[in-house]
């Protein structure tokens, strides 16, 4: 290829016997395409800032080479797999990137087509919470950090195995939604504004509300209401990381008041927005787009 898919710099790193956790920044200089090469370990990536526009991936050794699925906030590249990745537009993006040895998994995971598709957008709150904790520990190592990272990696392996098992619990012909309908729903949820109603999403997918709710549960293993709520909390986390005020976040996401937003956030995460911001590296106190110990949150 004419130029690299992205330039990567490592801002912080912790190594333990079964894993390496890295805070990394990817600088993409325009529309890009490249290949994430196969390796011996799992590559687990949680984007702490938004991914480049229309980031998507293709397991080209398994799929039609024109089949690209959206990369979510968390993706997993299994061992000995390669992924073609594409994006539109320039971007600077920060991630917590974990290279996890297969021995950290409680059992060997088999990656069929449905699991590979699900690996590109791991929407599991436990997996995300563990990765955020790893990000914090990597940036701010403390007493017995390596012991803590080993424990977190062990938990991460268990949660990924459970995630894969849940995918197997949904049979291929279970009446789930087609990929293009799921993509439309995800695209709507990426918009930072009021949460969509069931009627709006049903009209978007050209289905009845009943067909939408039943099909969505069959596809994703959860209600569409809980999925929408989780998406709003994810938006809120990213906005808080960018040092937006609680009031601004609450009204941008369509909450009736800051107090109702704080209640929903605490119920979903176990902490208040203020506590969340204190626990995760932010831009607070920075001027002129400078970095905080190597973590850059401006896009």
Image (cartoon, rainbow, N blue to C red):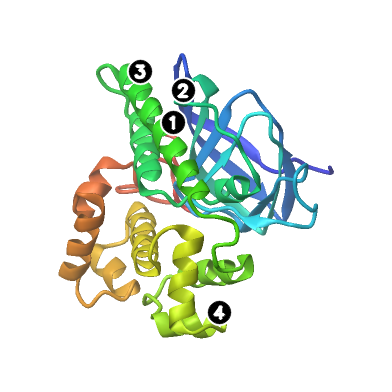
- The numbered dot on residue 205 is 4
Q: Position of residue 151 (x, y in %)?
A: 33, 23
Residue at the spot 66% in from the left edge and 47% down from the top edge: 113
Residue at the spot 27% in from the left edge and 16% down from the top edge: 144
- The numbered dot on residue 157 is 1
Q: Is label 2 or label 3 in front?
A: 2
Q: Position of residue 32 (x, y in %)?
A: 73, 51
Report, in whole angstroms, how far the alpha carbon at label 1 lies from the one at label 2.
Answer: 6 Å
Which residue lies under the disc numbered 2? 104
In the figure, is residue 146 to the left or right of 108?
A: left
Report, in whole angstroms, how far the alpha carbon at label 1 lies from the one at label 4.
Answer: 35 Å
User: Mark 2 vs mark 4: which is more N-terminal?
Assistant: 2
User: Mark 2 vs mark 3: which is more N-terminal?
Assistant: 2
When asked about the image quadrant of residue 199, the answer is bottom left
Residue at the spot 36% in from the left edge and 60% down from the top edge: 230
Which residue lies under the disc numbered 3? 146
| Disc 3 secondary structure class | helix
Q: Assess whether mark 4 and mark 2 are in contact (beta carbons under 8 angstroms).
A: no
Report, in whole angstroms, how far the alpha carbon at label 2 lies from the one at label 3.
Answer: 15 Å
User: Mark 4 vs mark 3: which is more N-terminal?
Assistant: 3
Residue at the spot 65% in from the left edge and 54% down from the top edge: 56
Q: Assess whether mark 2 and mark 1 are in contact (beta carbons under 8 angstroms).
A: yes
Q: Residues within 10 Å of mark 3 (few under 14, many from 20)?
A: some
User: Mark 3 vs mark 1: which is more N-terminal?
Assistant: 3
When asked about the image quadrant of residue 112, the answer is top right
In the figure, is residue 259 to the left or right of 4?
A: left
User: Mark 1 vs mark 4: which is more N-terminal?
Assistant: 1
| Disc 4 secondary structure class | helix
Q: Residues within 10 Å of mark 2 (few under 14, many from 20)?
A: many
Q: Is label 4 or label 3 in front?
A: 4
């Amino acid at each position: 290829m004419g130029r690299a898919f992205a330039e990567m710099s490592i801002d912080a790193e912790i190594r333990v016997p079964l894993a390496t956790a890295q805070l990394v920044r990817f600088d993409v200089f325009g529309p890009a395409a490249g290949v994430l090469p196969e390796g011996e370990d799992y590559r687990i990536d949680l984007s702490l800032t938004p991914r480049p526009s229309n980031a998507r991936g293709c397991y080209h050794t398994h799929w039609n080479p024109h089949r690209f699925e959206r990369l979510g906030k968390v993706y997993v590249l299994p061992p000995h797999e390669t992924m073609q990745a594409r994006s539109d537009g320039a971007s600077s993006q920060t991630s917590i990137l974990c290279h996890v040895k297969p021995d950290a998994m409680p059992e060997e995971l088999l990656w069929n087509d449905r699991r590979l598709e699900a690996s590109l957008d791991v929407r599991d709150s436990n997996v995300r919470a563990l990765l955020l904790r790893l990000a914090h520990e990597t940036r701010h190592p403390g007493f017995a950090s390596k012991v803590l990272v080993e424990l977190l990696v062990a938990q991460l392996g268990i949660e990924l195995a459970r995630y894969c098992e849940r995918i197997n619990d949904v049979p291929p012909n279970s009446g789930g939604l087609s990929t293009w309908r799921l993509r439309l729903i995800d695209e709507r949820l990426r918009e930072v504004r009021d949460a969509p109603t069931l009627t709006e999403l049903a009209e978007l997918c050209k289905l009845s509300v009943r067909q939408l709710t039943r099909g969505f549960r069959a596809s994703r293993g959860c209600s569409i209401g809980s999925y929408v709520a989780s998406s709003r909390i994810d938006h809120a986390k990213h906005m808080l990381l960018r040092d937006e005020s609680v009031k601004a976040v609450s009204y941008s996401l369509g909450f009736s008041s800051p107090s109702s937003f704080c209640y929903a956030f605490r119920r979903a995460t176990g902490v208040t927005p203020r506590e969340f911001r204190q626990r995760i590296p932010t831009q607070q106190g920075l001027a002129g787009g400078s970095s905080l110990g190597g973590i850059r949150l401006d896009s």
